[in-house]
Image (cartoon, grey):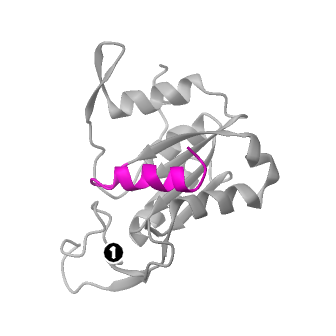
């Protein structure tokens, strides 16, 4: 894997986690696995889906490699940081950021989220100090989100996906939503 270019800028949010997993009998971090997949895929045939977008670190890496990206996070501040990081790296085109809470229930009500938090888990109890400002964030089924995104541009019907999940234990629900949506 090539190291990222030296002139990458990031702002806000927290750090990236490093969960070990097994790959070809070697322990590798989640970051390694995602970057490995990006380095070996063809951007013209693959889109990068970043669920639990946070500050958009992985989406920036994918954008620098030429991938079209869609990022989903339920925290409005994370969406702002991610968009800013795409622009700072001059890769804002080809990036769609969605401020949504993903739900396996098709008609789930909105969730109340701290508007200024980007700390993981849609924090309602942690923030930047002072009074919290809560906002309602729409809920949507992941299969619906991705199928709408694909339908918006017919050429997307022929692409593969690299999907990154970072959703604090909600991963099995996301996999089920991909199955329900006919995407997996």
Residue at 55%, 43% (x, y): give it: 184
Give the residues in magenta. Answer: 166-184
174 drawn magenta = yes
Q: Nearer the viewer, residue 144 or 41?
A: 144
- What secondary structure is marked by label 1? loop
Q: Horizontal and vertical percent for residue 56?
A: 45, 51
Q: Nearer the viewer, residue 6 or 136?
A: 136
Q: Horizontal and vertical percent for residue 79?
A: 47, 64
Q: Give the residue number, with chain letter if any, for mark 1.
A: 116
* The quarter of the displayed image where residue 64 is located: top right
Task: Tell me: residue 131, above or below residue 44.
Answer: below
Residue at 54%, 65% (x, y): give it: 98
Image position of 81 (left or right of 93) = left
Density class for disc 1 (Cα within 10 Å; few <14, some 14-19, many ≥20) is many
Task: Tell me: residue 79, above or below residue 166.
Answer: below
Residue at 73%, 34% (x, y): give it: 44
Residue at 51%, 46% (x, y): give it: 59
Task: Tell me: residue 103, above or below residue 29.
Answer: below
Q: Horizontal and vertical percent for residue 58?
A: 46, 42
């Amino acid at each position: 894997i090539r190291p990222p270019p030296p002139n990458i800028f990031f702002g806000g949010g927290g750090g990236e986690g490093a969960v070990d997993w097994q790959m070809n009998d070697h322990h590798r971090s989640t970051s390694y696995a995602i970057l490995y997949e990006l380095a070996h895929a063809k951007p013209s045939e693959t889109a990068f889906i970043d669920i639990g977008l946070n500050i958009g670190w992985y989406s920036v890496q994918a954008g620098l490699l030429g991938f079209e990206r869609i990022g989903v996070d339920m925290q409005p501040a994370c969406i702002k940081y991610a968009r800013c990081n795409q622009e700072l790296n001059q890769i804002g085109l080809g990036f769609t950021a969605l401020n949504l809470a993903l739900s396996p229930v098709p008609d789930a009500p909105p969730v109340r989220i701290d508007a200024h938090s980007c700390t993981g888990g849609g924090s309602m109890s942690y923030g930047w100090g002072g009074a919290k400002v809560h906002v309602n964030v729409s809920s949507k089924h992941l299969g619906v989100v991705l199928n709408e995104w694909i339908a918006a541009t017919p050429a997307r019907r022929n692409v593969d996906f690299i999907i990154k999940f970072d959703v604090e234990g909600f991963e099995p629900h996301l996999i089920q939503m991909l199955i329900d949506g006919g995407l997996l």
